[in-house]
Image (cartoon, rainbow, N blue to C red):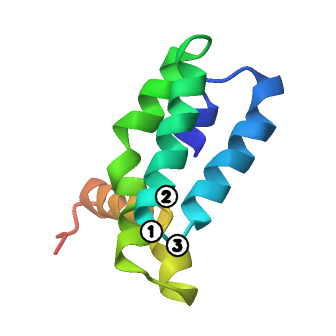
Amino acid sequence: MRNVLDHLPEEQRPWVKRKLAAAWAEPDANMARKALEALADSLEKNCPGAAASLREGLEETIAINRLMLQGALWRTLRSTNPIESTIENGKEHRAQGQEVA
């Protein structure tokens, strides 16, 4: 979400954020894809960077919809934070000269 929103003017962020959240909450992966593609199409003319960012990660962002995950596992995997945190921890250990498994 942050990658898309960063390409938008401040006044457009709230409605795009709502559209993104609704699409990602959609349990049907095909419906989620259609909603995200429609959003990207609507952003294309005035915010091509946001549209490109959305299209770039589209399949990855609906992967959880296809897996039909729920609960804590869904909340954990819908964010890149666990991955980014793991990468950051690895960098810190490497910088300290520790072995990264």
Q: Secondary structure at mark 1?
A: helix
Q: Residue furthest bottom?
A: 71
Label 1: how many Cα within 10 Å (few below 14, some 14–19, many 20+): few
Residue at 54% x, 47% y: name it: 35
Spatial CA span between label 2 and label 3: 8 Å
Residue at image mark 1: 82
Q: Residue 81 placed where, x, y %?
A: 49, 62
Residue at 50% x, 26% y: name it: 51
All told, the count of numbered labels is 3
Q: Secondary structure at mark 3?
A: loop
Q: Residue 18 placed where, x, y %?
A: 74, 49
Q: Is residue 83 left or right of residue 46?
A: left
Residue at image mark 3: 27
Q: Residue 67 placed where, x, y %?
A: 35, 77
Instruction: Check the image and report above or below for 99 versus 46.
Output: below
Q: Amino acid at mark 1?
A: Pro
Q: Which mark is residue 93?
A: none
Q: Residue furthest right?
A: 11
Instruction: Check the image and report above or below for 101 versus 44.
Output: below
Q: Is residue 6 left or right of residue 29?
A: right
Query: Which is in the foreground here, disc 2 or disc 3?
Result: 2
Front residue of 72/64: it is 64
Spatial CA span between label 1 and label 2: 26 Å
Q: Quadrant of the C terminus?
A: bottom left
Query: Which is in the foreground here, disc 1 or disc 2?
Result: 2
Residue at 17% x, 70% y: name it: 99
Residue 66 image-quadrant placement? bottom left
Q: Which mark is residue 31?
A: 2
Task: Choose the circle earlier in sequence order: 3 or 1.
Answer: 3
